[in-house]
Amino acid sequence: MAAAVRARAPRNRLRSLFGEHPIGYLFAAPFVLFLIGIYAYPFFYAIYMSFFDYFFSAPGAEVVRPFVGLGNYARVLQDPLFHIAIRNVVIFLVINVPLTVGLSMVLATALNSAIRFRTFFRAAYYVPYITASVAAVGIWLWLFSGFGLVDKLLGPLAPNPSFLINALLAMPIIALYVTWKGLGFYILVYLAALQTIPKELYEASKVDGASPIQSFFAVTVPGLRPATLLVIVTAVITGANFFTEPYLLTGGGGPENQSVSPVFLIYRFGIEQNHPGYAAAIGILLAIGVLLISGINRFVLERP
């Protein structure tokens, strides 16, 4: 009897440590290794690089990379180009996030109701999301370039200079492009969340005499609150990391760097100019900013 109790003791300790089904850790191990290799290791190595005057060298070459402490961070915070990039992120988020939340919520509610050609519209909204960015950018260049369709339709009312080479309009056009391209994904998120709202709530609001618009604000919007948090956090992360749009749509952050983004500066300084330590400092500051904004979003939206 005593021997059986002693034999069970290690088993109980393992169970208390790993739970009832420790084999689950075995199944999760590949993804954990993927996260460590693809995300965690580069992130911590970027922190290391940001404290050095780091530069790329030939494989096998022994070079000295001086330790500069917080010097890269101080230079980044004083860099006017970085200030423009942060300003552009703010412009992008102010336009993109409300439009993404509002349009995707309204369109998902419409597509969740019994309307004609519902399947067609669901697929149509999703097509831009799965279209290659280069092809989608080509459409917007055809629309908004100097000799584009929108300029021709506006005629004398078209802005001068045109949309994509206009310092005031380039960033709003980029924000609208990203909103249009990602809308299908966020509609899917809201469509999935709409299935979790009990139909009895809509029936009760109807019995109380609520109109469809009143039901939307009294039942749908509160019921979609968790999905809205996910959409906002995802849109903020996407907005802080936009790169393809200034690279392709405005020809490398033009006009005169007025549409550059922090990620585009990371590419320019880290890859094109071989200053990865400086680029890493921009990346770390950007990551801290995104974490702060996401934390504020969660604090505000998850309050009861």
Image (cartoon, rainbow, N blue to C red):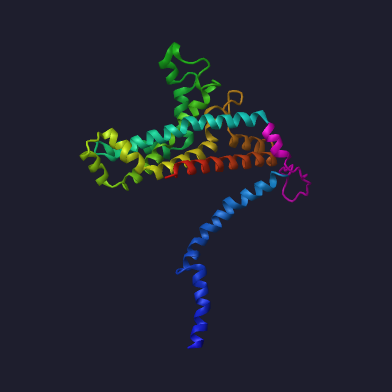
Instruction: Left or right? Give the position of 49 relative to 240.
Output: right
User: Residue 218 location in percent, x, y?
Assistant: 31, 38
Question: What range is drawn magenta here?
Answer: 52-78
Instruction: Left or right? Give the position of 76 relative to 237.
Output: right
Q: Residue at position x 49%, y 16% from top?
A: 159
Q: Is residue 176 magenta?
A: no
Instruction: Name, please, the residue furthest toward the top.
Output: 156
The answer, for residue 274, to whether it is visible in the render is no
Instruction: Name, please, the residue furthest toward the bottom.
Output: 1
User: From the viewer's perspective, is residue 59 above or below residue 164?
Assistant: below
Instruction: Left or right? Give the position of 128 relative to 82.
Output: left
Looking at the rendered image, the quarter that the C terminus falls into is: top left
| SS assignment for the magenta stretch, majority | loop
User: Residue 138 location in percent, x, y?
Assistant: 47, 29
Q: Residue at position x 33%, y 36% from top?
A: 217
Residue 215, located in which quarter of the rendered image? top left
The answer, for residue 183, to whether it is visible in the render is yes
User: Residue 219 location in percent, x, y?
Assistant: 31, 40
How many discs appear?
0
User: Residue 40 location in percent, x, y?
Assistant: 59, 52
Instruction: Name, please, the residue furthest toward the left.
Output: 207
Q: Does the magenta stretch include residue 65?
A: yes
User: From the viewer's perspective, is residue 289 above or below residue 85?
Assistant: below
Residue 105, located in which quarter of the rendered image? top left
